[in-house]
């Protein structure tokens, strides 16, 4: 997700003008968003295009497996950075609540559009990463009224509630694609009772429990950027990474007590459903990466024409289009899972080169007519300031 007016890390306080607060863009946040879209596309294309040779297993190709596994960080990065972006966006507005609500609903609308355009993967009920980010943005008028510590407490409450709700709803320990589309049997078969709400809350790809915790942590991290407290981001990221990694590690070693709570500590592969230990570990890693990128930008200014920045600025459009082109398109033309490992890697490289080159050209027009452009056009402006002493 692209936010239009991020803050400059070295300027912790807003600079007010007659038109409202203004801030320079944090290109490091765009670059991290660019990393996220790269990870998402490479994971998806690896799964959709690569045909495992007969007589071998996926694990017999460790290089492509490792590249694909890195994609597991894409959604956590997208959602966390969406929280960061909302915090920065709030700092540029005198009256941000209506704009945040509209932006959130528009992003959720993009998610519904994607559901309808990819019928071989989703149903209209599906709850994907866009739905979660949009939900977070739309509810930010509530969250932004909490202090930073209260935001982290709320994120912890989401994590604590997750295994309890999963147990209450008897959520399976593995969620296949048909289940995450809302079907109790085969794809297109009988629909789960209360399917939409089950998917949104617990059983979609990226449900509110536990994935909202990433967004809330991002909001807290965005505030720390505004207050020039990078050390707070590093401490939070380190603590979360250590706690999550410790929980996953102890479960893998069948440690007493920990092994009895798979809904809390198990690392599911793939991570559907995600456990609190996974969220802590990967969320901590994302926060540490955010800290690193901002530190690098402080030491050496980034170019707005850099490939990662360009990909980050067009990440919402890339997210939408790559799913339609390569998921539905490959099936429509008979190329689904029909490439060797080498061919798949070559296609991945070509996609990123073309996307970066087209993005640089598109940047000159302000990414006109893309998803980011439409989001900006639909975002309500701040109401005009009243003259001092005006009635009202």
Image (spheres, rainbow, N blue to C red):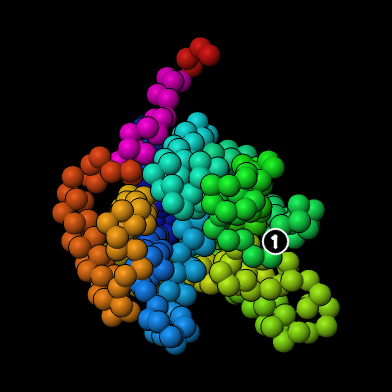
Q: Nearer the viewer, residue 4 or 164?
A: 164
User: What is the chief secondary structure element of the magenta stretch?
Assistant: loop
Packing grade of label 1 (10 A; few <14, some 14-19, many >=20) is: some
Whether 285 is drawn above or below 57: the answer is above
Percent x, y of residue 118: 41, 48
Percent x, y of residue 351: 25, 65
Q: Looking at the image, which residue is at 22% across and 56% down?
A: 359
Looking at the image, residue 342 sits to the left or right of residue 77; the answer is left
Looking at the image, residue 295 sits to the left or right of residue 255; the answer is left
Q: Quadrant of residue 157?
A: bottom right
Q: Nearer the viewer, residue 206 or 368?
A: 206
Q: Residue 380 colored magenta?
A: yes
Which range is magenta? Answer: 373-388
Q: Secondary structure at mark 1?
A: loop
Percent x, y of residue 202: 66, 52
Q: Residue 252 colored magenta?
A: no
């Amino acid at each position: 997700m692209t936010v239009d007016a991020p803050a400059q890390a070295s300027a912790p306080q807003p600079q007010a003008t007659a038109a409202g607060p203004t801030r320079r863009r944090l290109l490091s946040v765009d670059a991290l968003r660019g990393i996220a879209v790269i990870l998402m596309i490479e994971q998806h294309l690896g799964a959709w295009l690569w045909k495992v040779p007969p007589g071998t297993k996926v694990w017999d190709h460790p290089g492509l497996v490792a590249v694909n596994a890195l994609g597991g960080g894409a959604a956590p990065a997208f959602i966390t950075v969406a929280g960061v972006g909302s915090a920065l966006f709030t700092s540029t507005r005198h009256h941000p609540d209506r704009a945040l609500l509209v932006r959130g609903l528009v992003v959720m609308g993009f998610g519904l559009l994607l559901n309808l355009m990819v019928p071989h993967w989703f149903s209209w009920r599906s709850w994907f990463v866009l739905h979660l980010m949009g939900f977070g943005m739309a509810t930010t008028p509530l969250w932004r009224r909490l202090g930073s510590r209260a935001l982290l407490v709320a994120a912890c409450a989401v994590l604590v509630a997750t295994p309890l709700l999963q147990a209450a709803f008897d959520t399976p320990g593995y969620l296949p694609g048909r289940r995450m589309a809302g079907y109790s049997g085969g794809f297109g078969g009988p629909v789960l009772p209360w399917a939409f709400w089950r998917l949104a809350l617990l059983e979609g790809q990226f449900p509110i429990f536990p994935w909202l915790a990433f967004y809330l942590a991002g909001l807290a991290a965005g505030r720390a950027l505004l207050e020039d407290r990078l050390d707070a981001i590093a401490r939070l990221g380190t603590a979360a990474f250590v706690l999550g990694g410790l929980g996953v590690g102890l479960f893998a070693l069948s440690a007493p007590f920990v092994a009895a709570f798979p809904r809390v500590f198990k690392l599911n592969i793939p991570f559907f459903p995600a456990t609190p230990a996974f969220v802590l570990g990967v969320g901590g890693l994302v926060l540490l990466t955010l800290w690193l990128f901002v530190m690098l930008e402080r030491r050496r200014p980034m170019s707005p024409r850099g490939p990662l920045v360009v990909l980050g600025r067009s990440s919402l459009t890339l997210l939408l289009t790559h799913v339609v082109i390569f998921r539905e398109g490959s099936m429509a033309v008979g190329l689904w899972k029909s490439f060797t490992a080498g061919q798949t890697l070559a296609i991945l490289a070509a996609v990123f080169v073309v996307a970066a080159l087209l993005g640089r050209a598109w940047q000159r027009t302000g990414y006109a007519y893309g998803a980011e452009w439409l989001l900006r056009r639909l975002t309500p402006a701040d109401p005009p300031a009243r003259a001092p002493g005006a009635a009202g």
